[in-house]
Amino acid sequence: MLKHVSFLTRDLSAALQFYVRLGAVVEKDTLTPEGYRRGVLRLGEGRLQFFQIPGEVATPQGHWAEHIAVYVPALPELLRDLQAASVTVTRDLQPSPGGRPMAFVLDPDGRQVELLEADG
């Protein structure tokens, strides 16, 4: 069972705020013993962890094949809200291969995030 996935971010506050808009819950926003800022978000059963480390740069792969996928309620409305907040949409609302509504957006570091309509 997956515990968490960890990423670098250039702006932890922006990353946390973005994922909270997608339904995540901030569990930690703290400093590590080395003085690095660390944030942990709960998304369902899993966790996303972000580190903001001076001198380190987040360099996500731009291709959609490397992405985070998240179930969200009311995807069309969320997508409109994200667009109004200047979030970059890289794949507009369309059916996923399984027939579920989906879209792709970029998080504040340019990481691809697949949004899938949640059940009910």
Image (spheres, rainbow, N blue to C red):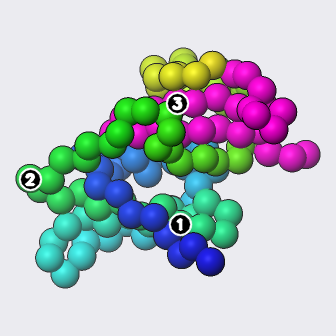
Residue 81 visible in the shown view: no
| Tag 2–tag 1 contact (CB < 8 Å) | no
- Asked if the magenta segment contains residue 119, the reply would be yes
In the picture of the structure, the residue carrying the numbered disc 1 is: 47
Mark 1 or 3 closer to N-term? Answer: 1
- Give whichever of 104, 64 is nearer the camera: 64
Q: Amino acid at mark 1?
A: Arg
Where residue 14 sits: x, y (%)? 37, 43
Compared with residue 11, is residue 99 higher up or lower down, i.e. above or below?
Answer: above
Compared to residue 85, the image places residue 19 above or below, namely below
The amino acid sitting under disc 2 is: Gly
| Contact, mark 1 vs mark 3 (Cβ under 8 Å) | no
Where's residue 76, x and y in %? 74, 25
Instruction: Look at the numbered disc 1 and give the secondary structure of its residue.
Output: strand
Query: In the shown orientation, is residue 18 left or right of residue 23?
Result: left
The number of numbered badges drawn on the structure is 3
Residue indicated by mark 2: 55
Q: Tell me the distance, in whole angstroms, between the alpha carbons under discs 1 and 3.
A: 19 Å
- In the shown orientation, is residue 38 left or right of residue 48? left
Q: Residue at x 60, y 47 (%)?
A: 69
Q: Secondary structure at mark 2?
A: loop
- Tell me residue 77's x, y (percent): 72, 26
Q: Secondary structure at mark 3?
A: strand
**Amino acid identity at mark 3:** Val
Local packing at callout 3 (Cα closer than 10 Å; few below 14, some 14-19, many 20+) is many
Residue name at image x 47 percent, y 25 percent: 87
Distance from disc 3 to disc 2, alpha carbons, whole Å, reads 26 Å
Q: Is residue 96 above or below residue 16?
A: above
User: Which quarter shows the N terminus?
Assistant: bottom right
Q: Which residues are magenta?
A: 93-120
Residue at the spot of label 3:
105
